[in-house]
Image (cartoon, helix red, strand yellow):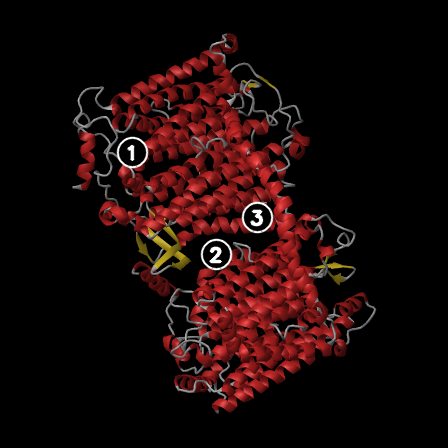
């Protein structure tokens, strides 16, 4: 009965007004909830292995080991994690929670307690995420073993320790069976991200970027923490099984009026956390700057895995979003759609290829949020999965270029990569990844996942979802343009290059085969990794046709957002967005690619001419300028938030120095020292005096004990 | 009798260790003498591993004691911290003689070698602590306490060849004798008032007296007061704390770490044993008012005097000595809260036992750093010598900063968790004022703990710290690293440990031998059905 009701909305699209869907009347879909099992605690090794690797890398750093040992340790332990995940997947029958050990159990008030076990919640959503998280991190660690070799003397072990922390935290985020473990992982990945963005800690811009990432994320984390607290306050538990059971049981029936006014804010709080971690409007500003970190980090943390934590949170908490507030999902959809559009416009006007990829990540994350918001968690999660592969490839190829050209990232300064010896794998894997990113019809994985999201925007009913669909299509056009702008510029065209100014890796292996001014092509670790991940991207197409992804999402807490794939009833071509969307999207994409081809391969000077024309026209001059300057969002935040805080901070600092510190703290701090001086004569180092003091002290205590009742009486009488 | 011996197996293992190390120490071969710490650690490990297998329900039910399960936790805790302490003191004893033998300036003289004796005393003292946990009569308790203390007097004296150490040992011994006399007097009065020296019987007598009109008889109360005050010497609580700073400063850092943990644990166990005869397990569940008043005053005095004493120090060792006093004060909160904390899962005694472990680890970490670095052949001592340590000995700077943070109770380090449990137990027992005072004291203590952190991490190296070099033996630094690692990692498992500490103090009739998972399930069901 319950699934039937849910499907009804899709069967009769014309009957319902194009307004927001009233979720209070739609019962959440039943999905299997995990039950606890005793065995399978070996699954904990997914977490323990990176932890062990962290300790060993720490030991390597402490013992000043200067070879590739930390990389070997990390790659092996992450491979171990991946195989345990695989084993878990093969042994998977139904959702289970696996208890590892007891963690928090604090009694609060009468009868309430705050329980958070260190347990794993394993359903298909968990497995979907863990498979690519552990798999990709293992491969990217392998890539980094070559990429980071310039730092063998300084930070090699530190880097791999950071990667290990990250995988541990990400695993606990995804696998935890309660919100607190998710929070642990959430903060853990935030910390790892800070650690690795600021890896080049002698570079001021890297330090600033690390701080920015950390601080902007704090805003989101505040939301998550509040959401966690409110969830506990309302449901009395933060364990998924119990929350889901309560939701399925019916929130309204049980808590209804007594549930507290705050219940409807829970989804928004959680959302704020997700927006921060996944770089959505208004908290996206940290992600482009995060590219200051080493490129493997950008690929792993800031493209493939960590930034999808927000999507994971929303998928995991999907029943909650659906049930607690009718506007929760539309908000997600709108934020996602607008972020996608904004980031794409910025991406079109950048010149730094890594930064373009960063904006495209923000934009694609926007698509994922849009997918979740328009009620296709399948689309969202599947896009996360496909995106993880092709975006990892894109970043890794950017990294290979940066590595080979001494830090050169400007797309105007490197050209014709396909024609250079040794760069073939890099340029053609990049080509395929670009196809995936733009969603090239049928042969790219991005096509399937993105279509699903865009089609669903036209199917689901919510405030302005159709407009969002159009926005998504426009964004797809832009995506096609800026992606191929990069590829046509860098990989095709005449061979010419200008080396960057970083002496990246040169002093390490420069003496035998190249000097400062020649690019050096990547070697086996980078090439192998690129090929394997590209194969993964191709393989994820197969997963679409086998309905694997759909199956993975349907059997989990995000199952409410998996619409039955093709629901009969519709006849004409334009009736079912799933029918026409592939065509429309394909055309959009190809048009975008052609524009990019024209401006950036066929007639490269035309792009400059166009820009000059735009800049010459006083009416629309602002547009390219604003786009190139990222719509001045950073400056806006600086003026509205940072500057007032800075001024306030200085006022408080002055007050602190002159009023609190001088007048109050110093005064109080001196009191104990004066007291100490008063007692000092007793500690004079003379044995007899100590004995007397002890005896005297005992006498004093005895007297006090003896007279205590009377003293109390006297005090009581006096007061 | 056989049952009693059964639980003494770990002690017997260590006793075998005593014999082995004292013989090995006389060996003319340097290699054998050098492996003494390893042998000590091996015996401690064996004792630690054996312990959990001894406490099956069958044997425990036949073991007459006020707290039959106490030994399990205590043995393992003592062995683990003992291993760290043994690592810390590796390479300390006979350093000068060994060096001259090495360089050929002298020949090895078994009569002048102290190393074997040192480790023998070391193990004997640990045996004393374990015996405290198994005591069921006053004589046994007294002997166990003395077995803990007597070797430490010698260890202080032999710890380094300086007059300071000799002076410290003499002071420690004389004042210790005075304290022993006092608690022995208290024991005599307890015997006088109850007619028995067996703790379980004494418990029965006191329970009976408490139920009667007249209440517990005054002789008993006075006896208990005297016994407790005497034992306060072992835990360095006011007013018996005067020796601490001088003795801790005089002894070498590894021995100081030993003094701060081992006698303190023995003393705490003795206090728990004695108080459990009077009130805790009676129907009312409260200690008699005079005892409570005395404990309260002593706790407040101890932590306050300890903390303000530490404020004035420039010597890190003296500072840590005073901090050791303050920590005894914090632990007394748990004693005052007692075992019955109303089903909230955190009781006072469990918190004390947990805190002992936490304190043992973090304190050892701090002292190991002092033991692992040296200036002009002497271990480092003053704050000036710590300055700018980050530049020259980064790992050690991190360790001492972490251990200072933990001693301060900085979340999420081990000391924070320990203190949190103590404070929760205190609040649960209604001792709000006491907890507030302890909180204020923690704030005061931030001053000097943070000055350690500041000196080692933020300050620039000065003339005194620039000549600080790594000590000859790597082991103290290994101990420091391990202990600091434990300070960071153990908090993750703290709840399980706390449960283990908690279950230990259940009285015989409510003794449950549930497995870990069963207990977990039980707690979970409890929380679901308010």
Give the secondary structure at mark 1: loop
Between B477 and A432, the one lying in front of the other is: B477
Marks 1,2: beta carbons within 8 A: no
- According to the image, label 3 marks what residue? A57
Give the secondary structure at mark 2: helix
Q: Of callouts 1 and 3, which one flags the residue occurring earlier in the amino acid sequence?
A: 3
Estimate the spatial distance between the alpha carbons at disc 3 and disc 2, rounded to whole Å: 20 Å
- Mark number for residue B492? 2
**How many numbered discs?**
3
- Can residue B374 be seen in this snapshot? yes
Q: Chain of mark 2?
A: B
- Residue at the spot 62% in from the left edge and 85% down from the top edge: B181
Dot 1 alpha-carbon crowd within 10 angstroms: few under 14, some 14 to 19, many 20 or more: many
- Mark number for residue A697? none
Q: Chain of mark 1?
A: A
Q: In the rendered image of this protein, does residue A183 appear above or below residue B428?
A: above
The answer to whether marks 1 and 2 sit on the same chain is: no
Quarter of the image where one finds residue B161 = bottom right
Quarter of the image where one finds residue A522 = top right
Q: Position of residue A680 (x, y in %)?
A: 71, 67
Q: Position of residue B469 (x, y in %)?
A: 74, 55
- Mark number for residue A375? 1
Between A3 and A578, the one lying in front of the other is: A3
């Amino acid at each position: 009965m319950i699934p039937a009701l849910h499907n009804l909305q899709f069967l009769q699209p014309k009957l319902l007004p194009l307004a927001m869907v009233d979720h209070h009347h739609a019962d959440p879909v039943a999905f299997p909830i995990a039950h606890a099992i005793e065995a399978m605690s070996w699954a904990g090794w997914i977490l323990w292995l990176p932890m062990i690797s962290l300790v060993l890398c720490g030991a390597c750093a402490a013992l000043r080991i200067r070879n590739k040992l930390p990389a070997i340790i990390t790659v092996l332990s992450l491979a171990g994690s991946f195989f345990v995940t695989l084993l878990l997947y093969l042994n998977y029958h139904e959702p289970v929670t696996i208890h590892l050990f007891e963690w928090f159990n604090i009694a609060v008030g009468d009868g309430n307690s705050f329980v958070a076990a260190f347990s794993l919640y394993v359903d298909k959503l968990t497995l979907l995420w863990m498979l690519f998280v552990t798999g990709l991190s293992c491969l990217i660690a392998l890539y980094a073993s070559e990429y980071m070799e310039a730092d063998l003397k300084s930070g090699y072990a530190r880097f791999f320790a950071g990667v290990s922390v990250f995988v541990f935290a990400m695993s606990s985020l995804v696998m935890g069976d309660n919100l607190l473990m998710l929070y642990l992982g959430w903060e853990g990945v935030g910390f790892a991200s800070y650690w690795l963005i600021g890896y080049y800690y002698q570079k001021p811009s890297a330090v600033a970027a690390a701080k920015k990432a950390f601080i902007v994320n704090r805003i989101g984390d505040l939301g998550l923490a509040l959401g966690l607290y409110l969830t506990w306050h309302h449901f009395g538990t933060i364990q998924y099984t119990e929350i889901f059971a309560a939701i399925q049981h019916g929130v309204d029936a049980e808590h209804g009026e007594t549930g507290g006014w705050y219940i409807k804010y829970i989804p928004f709080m959680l959302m704020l956390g997700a927006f921060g971690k996944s770089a959505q409007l208004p908290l996206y500003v940290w992600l482009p700057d995060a590219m200051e970190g080493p490129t493997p980090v950008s690929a792993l943390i800031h493209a493939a895995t960590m930034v999808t934590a927000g999507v994971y949170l929303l998928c995991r908490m999907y029943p909650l979003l659906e049930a607690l507030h009718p506007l929760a999902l539309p908000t997600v959809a709108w934020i996602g759609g607008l972020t996608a559009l904004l980031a794409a416009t910025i991406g079109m006007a950048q010149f730094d290829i890594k930064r373009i990829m960063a904006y495209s990540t923000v934009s694609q994350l926007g698509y994922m949020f849009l997918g979740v918001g328009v009620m296709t968690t399948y689309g969202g999660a599947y896009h996360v999965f496909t995106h993880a592969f092709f975006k990892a490839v894109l970043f890794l190829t950017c990294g290979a270029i940066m590595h080979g050209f001494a830090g050169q990232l400007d797309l105007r300064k490197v050209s014709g990569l396909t024609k250079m010896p040794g760069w073939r794998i890099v340029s053609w894997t990049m080509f395929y990844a670009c196809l995936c990113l733009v969603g090239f019809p049928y042969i790219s994985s991005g096509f399937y996942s993105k279509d699903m999201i865009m089609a669903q925007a036209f199917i689901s009913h919510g405030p302005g979802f159709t407009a969002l669909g159009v926005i998504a299509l426009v964004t797809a056009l832009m995506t096609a343009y800026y992606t191929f702008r990069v590829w046509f510029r860098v990989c095709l065209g005449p061979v010419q290059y200008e080396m960057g100014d970083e002496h990246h890796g040169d002093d390490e292996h420069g003496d035998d085969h190249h000097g400062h001014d020649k690019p050096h092509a990547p070697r086996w670790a980078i090439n192998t990794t690129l090929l394997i991940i590209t194969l993964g991207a191709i393989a994820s197409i197969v997963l679409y046709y086998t309905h694997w992804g759909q199956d993975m999402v349907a059997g989990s807490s995000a199952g409410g957002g998996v619409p039955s794939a093709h629901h009969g009833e519709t006849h004409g071509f334009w009736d079912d967005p799933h029918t026409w969307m592939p065509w429309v999207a394909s055309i959009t994409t190809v048009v975008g690619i052609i524009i990019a081809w024209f401006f950036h391969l066929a007639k490269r000077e035309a792009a400059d001419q166009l820009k000059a024309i735009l800049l010459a026209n006083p009416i629309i001059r602002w547009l390219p300028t604003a786009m190139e300057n990222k719509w001045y969002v950073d400056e806006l935040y600086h003026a509205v938030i940072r500057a007032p805080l800075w001024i306030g901070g200085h006022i408080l600092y002055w007050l602190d120095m002159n009023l609190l510190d001088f007048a109050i703290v110093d005064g109080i701090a001196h009191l104990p020292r004066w007291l100490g001086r008063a007692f000092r004569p007793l500690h004079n180092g003379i044995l007899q005096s100590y004995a007397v003091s002890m005896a005297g002290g005992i006498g004093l205590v005895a007297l006090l004990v003896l007279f205590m009742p009377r003293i109390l009486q006297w005090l009581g009488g006096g007061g | 009798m056989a049952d009693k011996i059964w639980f003494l197996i770990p002690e017997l293992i260590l006793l075998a260790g005593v014999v082995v190390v004292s013989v090995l120490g006389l060996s003319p071969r340097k290699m054998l003498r050098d492996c003494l710490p390893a042998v000590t650690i091996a015996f401690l490990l064996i004792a630690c591993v054996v312990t959990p297998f001894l406490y099956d329900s069958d044997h425990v039910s036949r073991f007459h004691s006020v707290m039959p399960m106490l030994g399990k936790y205590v043995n393992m805790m003592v062995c683990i911290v003992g291993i760290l302490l043994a690592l810390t003191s590796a390479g300390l004893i006979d350093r000068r003689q060994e060096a001259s033998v090495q360089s050929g300036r002298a020949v090895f003289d078994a009569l002048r070698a102290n190393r074997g004796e040192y480790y023998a005393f070391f193990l004997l003292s640990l045996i004393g602590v374990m015996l405290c946990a198994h005591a069921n009569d006053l004589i046994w308790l007294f002997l166990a306490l003395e077995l803990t203390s007597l070797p430490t007097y010698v260890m202080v004296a032999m710890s380094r060849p300086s007059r300071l150490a000799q002076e410290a040992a003499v002071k420690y011994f004389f004042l210790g004798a005075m304290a022993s006399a006092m608690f022995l007097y208290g024991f005599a009065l307890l015997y006088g008032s109850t007619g028995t020296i067996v703790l379980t019987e004494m418990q029965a007598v006191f329970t009976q007296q408490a139920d009667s009109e007249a209440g517990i008889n005054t002789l008993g109360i006075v006896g208990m007061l005297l016994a407790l005050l005497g034992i306060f010497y072992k835990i360095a609580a006011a007013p018996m704390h005067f020796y601490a700073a001088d003795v801790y400063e005089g002894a070498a850092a590894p021995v100081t770490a030993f003094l701060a943990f081992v006698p303190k644990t023995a003393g705490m166990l003795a206090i728990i044993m004695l108080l459990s005869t009077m009130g805790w397990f009676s129907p009312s569940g409260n200690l008699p008012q005079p005892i409570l008043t005395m404990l309260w005053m002593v706790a407040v005095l101890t932590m306050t005097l300890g903390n303000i004493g530490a404020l004035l120090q420039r010597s890190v060792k003296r500072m840590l000595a005073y901090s050791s006093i303050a920590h005894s004060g914090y632990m007394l909160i748990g004693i005052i809260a007692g075992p019955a904390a109303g089903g909230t899962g955190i009781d006072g005694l469990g918190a004390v036992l947990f805190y002992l472990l936490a304190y043992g680890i973090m304190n050892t970490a701090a002292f190991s750093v002092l033991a692992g670095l040296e200036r002009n052949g002497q271990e480092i001592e003053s704050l000036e010598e710590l300055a700018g340590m980050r530049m020259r000995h980064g790992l050690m700077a991190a360790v001492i900063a972490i251990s200072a943070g933990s001693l301060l109770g900085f979340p999420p380090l081990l000391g924070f968790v320990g203190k949190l449990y103590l404070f929760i137990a205190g609040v649960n027992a209604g001792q709000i004022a006491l907890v507030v005072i302890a909180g204020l004291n923690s704030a005061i203590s931030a001053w000097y703990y943070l000055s350690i952190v500041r000196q080692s991490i933020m300050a620039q190296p000065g003339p005194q710290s620039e000549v600080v070099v790594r000590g000859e033996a790597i082991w103290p630094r290994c101990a420091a690293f391990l202990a600091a690692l434990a300070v960071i990692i153990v908090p993750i498992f703290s709840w399980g440990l706390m449960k283990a500490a908690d279950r230990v103090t259940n009285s015989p009739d409510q003794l449950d031998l549930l497995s870990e998972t069963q207990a977990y399930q039980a707690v979970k069901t409890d929380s679901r059905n308010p």
